[in-house]
Structure formats: C-alpha cells, structure tokens
Image (cartoon, rainbow, N blue to C red):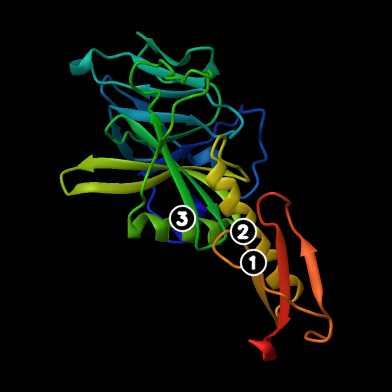
Amino acid sequence: YSLLKSENIPVPRYQVLKRKDDLNQSIEGLSLPSDSQTMEEHEDHLTINDVVFTKPFVEKPLNADDHNIYIYYPQAAGGGSQRLFRKVYERSSIYSPISRVRKFGSYVYEDFMPTDGQDVKVYTIGLHYAHAEARKSPTLDGRVERDKEGKELRYPVILSAKEKEIARLVALAFKQNICGFDLLRANGANGQQVYVCDVNGFSFVKNSHKYYEDCAQVLGELILSELSPELVFVLKQRAFPTIPVTPEQVSNDKLVDVLPGMVTKVLLLKSCLS
C-alpha cells in the first residue's frame, strides 16, 4: 500500500498494526515502529495509532501468504465477522458470531468498501494492455459459483479510461510487465470510486484463449524490441497477408518462430526499408 500511495494509485484508507510478538519480524519494504503503536477496541469501532475505523472494516494479515482475511460488522447489522480464506471446495468464506479482532499477529486494517457484489481481477501485459474479469465476491454468502467444468465463474469486464491508467501505473510501480491486481469498484456518496486492494504480482488469467493470444503478441513485441530496437518487426497473424522476402532484400534476414500456434512467424526488417 505504501508503494501504491507513493505513486498516487488509490487505495482504501488503512493503518498497519505490527506486534512485537509476531514471529515474522522482518518484512521487506516496511519500516514499522512496533514499540510506539497503539490499539483500542470498542464495540463498533477500532482505533489504531489515533486513526478510527468504524465497522464494517477489514483485517488483513501483514503476511501476504496468509489469506485469512476477516471483515467485522457493526451490532446494528447483526455483528460478527465474515472470514475469508482460499477456496475449499464450494466455499470461500464463512460467517462467525465473533466480533472481536485477533489479538496475535500483525495486520493491515482498512475501510470496508461496499461494491455490487463483485471483485474485479486485472491482468496487465506491458504498460498498454490490461485484461479484466469479475467474479462473485466472497464477502456475500461465501459460496463459489462454478461452471459445468467445475471452474470458478468469471465474467468479462470493460475497464474505464481511469481504470486503464491505474493498470499502467501499477505495472510501472512494481516494475512488472505481467502483473495481476484486484480492483474495487466502490459505491459511495460521491458516486463510484475505484481502489486497488491487492497486488498479486506475476499472475496469469486462468481460462481465456484470447488473453493468451494477446499475451503472446504483446510479449513477442516487447522481447523483440529489447533484442533489436533498431529493427522494425511485422507480426504475421490472421489480419496480415504473407510478406515474401528474400535474403537479398534484407542483409541480415531473420525469420523466427515465436510461441508457435499463437504468434507464428516474425519478420524483422531494417527500418530503412519501412
């Protein structure tokens, strides 16, 4: 979150609570004054370092490998908490009557952002391509929607211009051409706001032929531009006719197979021939 904020990428309001007794004392990129942190818990709100979080709020383990995320609800809504975890068969979360926050371990606390019941997953390839799809939010009833093949149902999403710019900024901030992150389309008093709530790093779409075709093309262009920036390349695809070329036409003729079946052949020509 600190990196996202430094790059002016919108994130939910948050605070970090780092406990001294946490076994994971060293977390790369974080400088946390554990001896000066304070927490006060009340029935319907939590105060961390003088910052107040009114229920509902989210409690995320500071350890990114721990997916046990809790959402705490106010007494007016019945209290208790929704406990999210990695999918187990048909469930991704379960309700608990326990309303008190965890007293062991280190956590990120953040405002709960109300959405339309969907999480948006975004996958970048370079700075100018982003694939997005939505799934049913695990915060609803905890039941996983699956298709006939048993895979989690996902729906195509069209990103707005603002969301595309956020995708570009995330890829730049983490210095990863292939980068996955979670987007919240939150409904508030000022209309729909967009926040990044998680960055998954190097990740791919699970089931989309078009994504992999696009991925092959974009990565092919990125790789070739790095290897031979002085050359102009033409990707032979369905939309392009076959371009005949002889060794006499290009002094250092290169005909390369790149990712067979997706981007078939790449023809490199010297820029002077363009």
Q: Residue at x 59, y 50 (%)?
A: 213
Q: Residues within 10 Å of mark 2 (few under 14, many from 20)?
A: many
Q: Residues within 10 Å of mark 3 (few under 14, many from 20)?
A: many
Instruction: Please state which of residues 7 and 260 is positioned toward the viewer in this rendering.
Output: 260
Residue 24, horizontal then vertical, whole percent: 66, 32
- Can the viewer see residue 229? yes
Residue 209, horizontal then vertical, whole percent: 56, 42
- Eyeballing the image, is 244 above or below 217? below
- Dot placed on the residue nearer the N-terminal end, 1 or 2: 2
Q: Residue at x 27, y 33 (%)?
A: 116
Residue 248, horizontal then vertical, whole percent: 83, 86
Q: Residue at x 36, y 51 (%)?
A: 159
- Eyeballing the image, is 258 above or below 122? below
Query: Marks 1 and 2, Cα distance to the nearest angstrom?
Result: 8 Å
Judge left or right: residue 109 versus residue 176. left
Instruction: Please state which of residues 83 and 15 is positioned toward the viewer in this rendering.
Output: 83
**Residue at the disc numbered 1:** 235
- The amino acid type of the residue labelled 3 equals Ala
Instruction: Please state which of residues 220 and 106 is positioned toward the viewer in this rendering.
Output: 220
Give the numbered dot on residue 85: none
**Residue at the disc numbered 2:** 217
Quarter-of-image position of residue 243: bottom right
Query: Marks 1 and 3, Cα distance to the nearest angstrom?
Result: 25 Å
- Can the viewer see residue 230? no
